[in-house]
Image (cartoon, grey):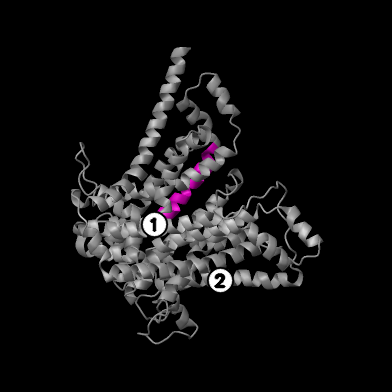
Amino acid sequence: MLTQTKQRQGIDMALIAGVTLVVATLSILPMGRLVFELVMPQGSFSLRPIQTAMGSSTTWTATWHSLQVGVGGTLLSVVLGTSVALLVSLTDVRAKSPFVLFYVVPLLIAPQVTALAWLQLFGPASPFLKLVGLAPALGSRNPLYSTTGIIVLLGVQYGPLVFLMVRAGLRKLPRELVEAALSSGAGRLTVLRTIILPLMTPSIIGATALAFVSCVGNFGIPAFLGIPANYLVLPTLIYQRLAGGGPAVLSEVAVLSFLIGLIAIAGILAQDYTSRRRDYRIASTSLPAAPFELGGWRICFEILMWSLIVVVLILPILGLFLTSLVSAYGIPLNAKTVTLANYAFVMFDHTAASRAFLNSFGLSIAAALFAVVLAVPLAYLVTWRVRWWTNFLNLSVELPYALPGVVLAIASLLLFLKPLPILGVQIYNTIWIIFYAYLARFLVLAVRPTISGLHQIDRSLEEAAQVAGAKLLYRMRSIIFPLVAPATLAGGILIFMTAFSELTVSALLWASGSETIGVVIFSFEQGGDSNYAAAISVLTVALTFILMLFTSLFARHLPAGVLPWRD
């Protein structure tokens, strides 16, 4: 009996050690390497990289631009997302589920695809504007090549993120507080202003912080809209420095990436400070408040809702699709000019594009599968084996996703610039460094739903198996994983959709032979081949939407909140 107990303890310790080692390798090690480079650039103490980076006027201009579009995009996304959340959650508007599905789509589409879609919709060569007779003259400046254009697209991109977080808070709004205020004669606007919005403050503040971090770290939208206008933010400045200087400037760009991290952390700390100033706890376990009846105004709000979908999703995707059907820039679309040659070229004829499809598919599948396997024991430790260190383990998994992707990319470059110790294997400038970064960044997307699934499962079955002598690995394989498999696999699908056309990380890590779809889209657009870029983008959007619909078929088997687009 004592021997069996020791064996179980040994297996437990091996699991803890293994999971901790993997998390440390994916999270703590790269961030530690980034901090080390700031203090000891190229292995010796020097302040020169810091002085060079911080003494450049370009750095401060890019920092100001990052703050400008970060704050502007955040404010727009908060206003847009909160308004939509209030309308969907508090009123009796119809067709909520399909509306939520369509409204969340921009969040799951890569930012560079969003930027390209809007550029093709409003540009002087827009086939859509030509069809309706509103296209400006060829050679005219695209209005989106501006600070306002970047802010608008960041607001569109992350408005659904704010919507999801605020809606989650509104679902916990207690019925009795709202009904008591209404029964005492308060109007709906008064209830909204004095009860609902104050109670939603933590959700709104949290959403604001997350949107700010996302806006500051976004690469795709400022790259597509800012670089042509010579409007650089910190991520695009890092990209240009690396593209021009290579590994020789890694110490300098490490300073810039650390600066982005400080800005992001400052936003998170501001959110935490604001949240602590008041007590927002709700001492209630009642059902959510009944929806407000809009009466004759309901049809007006429904028209407004679906008009928003048309503006932020349908029209940009339509503009992108029409661009993919014309053979060259500026040619109007008609029965004689429509062609599928762009799709044939990017899928079969262009070597880098064809390779990018395979690379992105393989990287996304591999990252999703590895994350699914790792998420179960990690979530098990965090949820059912709570210790003083498990919170630190959970926060370590969150860190690479919470910080801007460019920070992780630079940290990965620094970590793998030299061959791996002992093994002597070089993964710098190979596809494996992208795989490492994807796994580090997106692991949390599988861990979160797995933790949610474990919280909703009765542990008695696993405890009974443990009492009967079943070893931990056997319990993991035969009991725990089957119970949380739907939630964990849904997280894996989210990883696949997010990683498939990712650009922020891969733009800094790719090399010849390891191109990803995001990199190829960016290269085509930068080279003036917008038709090819549009064709690839349409394919990625179609795949994303198909996966969303496919996963929704199994929604009833998943814990609440696992699928963000499920109402």
Position in image of residue 19 (x %, y %): 40, 35
Q: In this view, does 55 lie to the left or right of 106?
A: left
- Residue at point 43%, 18% (across, down): 6
Task: Tell me the SS state at disc 1.
Answer: loop
Residue 433 in view here:
yes
Q: Is residue 508 left or right of residue 148?
A: left
- Residue at point 60%, 28% (across, down): 460
Position in image of residue 207 (x %, y %): 53, 58
| Residue type at the position of mark 1 | Pro
Identify the residue position indicated by label 1 in the image. 404
Q: Which is nearer the eye, 180 or 450? A: 180
Where does the C terminus fall, quadrant-wise? bottom right
Q: Residue most toward the front?
A: 277
- Residue at point 65%, 64% (across, down): 87
Q: In this view, does 195 lie above or below 4?
A: below
Q: Does the magenta stretch include residue 404?
A: no
The span from disc 1 to disc 2 (Cα, nearest Å) is 30 Å
Which-is-in-front pick, marks 1 and 2? Answer: 1
Task: Tell me the SS state at disc 2.
Answer: helix
Q: Residue most toward the top?
A: 1
| Residue type at the position of mark 2 | Val
Magenta extent:
484-501
Q: Is residue 486 magenta?
A: yes
Q: Which is nearer the eye, 432 or 69? A: 69
Q: Around disc 1, counting alpha carbons within 10 Å, would you say few (fewer than 14), some (14 to 19), or many (20 or more)?
A: many
Identify the residue position indicated by label 2 in the image. 310
- Residue at point 34%, 59% (across, down): 259
> Image quadrant of residue 513?
bottom left
